[in-house]
Image: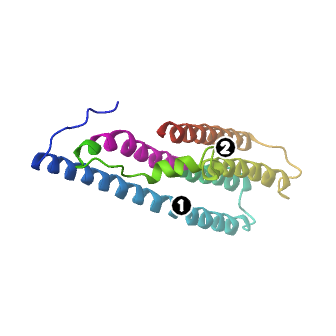
Amino acid sequence: MTPEPTTTVGPSADRFLKLHIAEYNALTTRSTYYITISASLVPVIVILLALVAQMWSNPYSKHALLIWPTGVAIQFFLLAMIENAQVQYQNIKYIEKVLRPLIGPLLQPPSGFWRYERYLSDQRRGAQWWEYTPAVGAAVTVGAAIAGRLLDPAQRSATWDALDWVGVGFNALFLVVAFWNSFKVVALRRSIF
């Protein structure tokens, strides 16, 4: 869905150019906000783990009620990070596939511009570590939750109850969604160039 470029020249072209640059600035500002939100999720996970560790030491706490919801919450934050990467790549794709063709003909004389994403694409051929890190983090979270339940001294003599199986089910679902979305993010990045 590449739009037809505008071929006007003069003051009208200047107005179109300013409009497209304003749209570019809005997209890059949105990307900055998403990066800030994504960076703030890591401390939230650390705070959540500190709270769970404090509640774990309470002799009356039911550890299954701590482990499984914590696993889901951590995976939720990791899914938000994956979504952030997807939004970033969608913004880049829009800039490269829609805005660039609209702006190019308005420049007098025509010249190349916004070459940095192309440069990065040439440097990055395969999957990048940050594209799968949240999904791997989700796998580690599920593994740690299962290990935590199996190694829990209060759980050793008991069998898993329905809460444990529901917890494993929800965590496994989030894990599958994390990997699926990570694959989609990689495919989106590869579709840009």
Q: Secondary structure at mark 1?
A: helix
Q: Residue 136's mark?
A: none
Residue 80, can we see it? no
Is 119 situated above or below 41?
Answer: above
Q: Residue at x 16, y 46 (%)?
A: 13
Is 28 situated above or below 121?
Answer: below
Three-letter amino acid code at the position of disc 2: Asn
Q: Nearer the viewer, residue 161 or 23?
A: 23
Q: Is residue 157 magenta?
A: no
Q: Which residue is mark 1?
A: 41
Q: Residue at x 27, y 45 (%)?
A: 103
Magenta stretch: give its range. 82-102
Three-letter amino acid code at the position of disc 1: Leu
- In the rendered image, the residue lying farthest to the left is 11
Q: Give how far apart the Cα atoms at labels 2 and 1 are.
A: 19 Å
- Name the image colouring: rainbow
Q: Secondary structure at mark 2?
A: helix
Q: Nearer the viewer, residue 35 or 49?
A: 35
Q: At which x and y percent is residue 33?
A: 40, 59
Answer with left or right where residue 31 lies relative to residue 108. right
Quarter of the image where one finds residue 151: bottom right
Q: Is residue 87 magenta?
A: yes
Q: At which x and y percent is residue 96?
A: 39, 43
Mark nearer the N terminus (2 vs 1): 1
Q: Residue 171's mark?
A: 2
Q: At which x and y percent is residue 56?
A: 72, 64
Q: Are marks 2 and 1 in contact (CB under 8 Å)?
A: no
Quarter of the image where one finds residue 50: bottom right
Answer with left or right where residue 116 lies relative to residue 54. left
How many tags in the picture?
2
